[in-house]
């Protein structure tokens, strides 16, 4: 929070700086009029005067620079950045180059374009290494850029992990389906095979009669089979419920 406060204050101080015109008397008059209104915090009226100066001399560096300052104070950060970019090719040769790059950094910072902010604050520091505001803002913008990149990398890793989990679950489900089908086939083969072997006498032997069992014994065997089947069904239901619950948690997460 303290860093943010310093940055906002630094931005205000930077954009309080205005230039005087160096061209003809008319556009110089408009620029000076704009500067007086800027000092009174009449930024909209100041912007109008700077635009008048630009109508008289579209190459006026002072009018363009100060117009961007007024737009910044009006919180038209994107427009302020565009105006400053229009004189980017001339800015490095200007005596106000350090201030220009610092102000361009502030517009980038306001737009949360941290990469651009780092770039132009560096240019400001190359021209004025003693500018503590530029140094603080450069460090802040660089930290915010690193945080954003780390966050994006983490999001990408999380998405990859979720994709891997989904793929593994699909593979496990397909594997279980294949195993269950194979088990069913084996059971069918065993039943079919056993039926044929029982119906056909073994080589060199005569068929034998099937032993008889009492009704009570048969009922007990039937009860045992039904109890085992119910136990198996309950187990399958619990496993399915657990799988469904697990998938629901994954989806919510």
Image: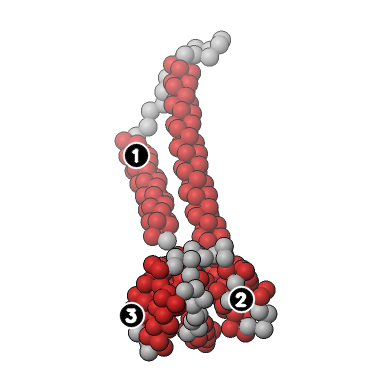
Instruction: Please name whichever residue, 222 or 51, is drawn nearer the observer in this view of the structure.
Output: 51
Seen at 42% across and 74% down, the residue is 27
* Quarter residue 46 falls in: bottom left
Q: Mark 1, residues whose alpha carbon is within 10 Å: few (<14), some, or many (≥20)?
A: few
Question: Where residue 80 sits: x, y (%)?
Answer: 43, 70
Crowdedness near tag 2: few (<14), some (14–19) or many (≥20) residues, C-alpha within 10 Å: few
**Element carrying mark 2:** loop
Q: Residue under circle 2?
A: 95
In this view of the protein, which residue sits in the foreground, 206 or 112?
112
Residue at 53% from the left image edge and 14% from the top image edge: 202
From this viewpoint, is residue 63 visible? Answer: yes
Q: Residue at x 48, y 18 (%)?
A: 197
Q: Looking at the rendering, in which quadrant would you find the C terminus?
A: bottom left
Are the residues at dot 2 and dot 1 in contact (C-beta closer than 8 Å)? no
Point out which mark residue 222 bears.
1
In the rendered image, residue 238, in percent from the top left (x then y), is placed at 39, 53
How far separated are the C-alphas under marks 3 and 1? Answer: 98 Å
Residue under label 3, please give it.
45
Label 1 secondary element: helix
């Amino acid at each position: 929070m303290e860093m943010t406060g310093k940055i906002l204050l630094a931005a205000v101080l930077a954009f309080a700086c205005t230039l005087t015109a160096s061209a003809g008397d008319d556009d110089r008059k408009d620029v000076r009029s704009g500067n007086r209104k800027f000092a009174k915090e009449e930024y909209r009226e100041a912007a109008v005067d700077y635009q008048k100066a630009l109508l008289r001399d579209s190459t006026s560096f002072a009018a363009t620079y100060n117009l961007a300052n007024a737009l910044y104070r009006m919180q038209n950060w994107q427009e302020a950045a565009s105006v400053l970019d229009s004189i980017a090719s001339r800015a490095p040769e200007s005596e106000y180059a350090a201030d220009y790059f610092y102000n361009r950094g502030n517009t980038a910072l306001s737009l949360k374009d941290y990469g651009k902010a780092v770039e132009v604050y560096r240019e400001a520091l190359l021209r004025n290494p003693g500018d503590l505001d530029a140094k603080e803002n450069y460090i802040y913008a660089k930290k915010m850029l690193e945080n954003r990149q780390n966050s994006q990398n983490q999001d990408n890793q999380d998405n990859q992990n979720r994709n891997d989990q989904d793929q593994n679950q699909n593979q496990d489900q397909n594997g279980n389906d294949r195993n269950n089908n194979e088990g069913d086939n084996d059971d069918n083969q065993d039943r079919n095979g056993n039926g044929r072997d029982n119906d056909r006498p073994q080589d060199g032997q005569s068929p034998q009669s099937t032993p008889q069992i009492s009704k009570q014994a048969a009922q007990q065997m039937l009860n045992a089979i039904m109890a085992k089947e119910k136990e198996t069904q309950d187990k399958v239901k619990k496993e399915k419920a657990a799988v469904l619950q697990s998938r629901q948690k994954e989806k919510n997460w």
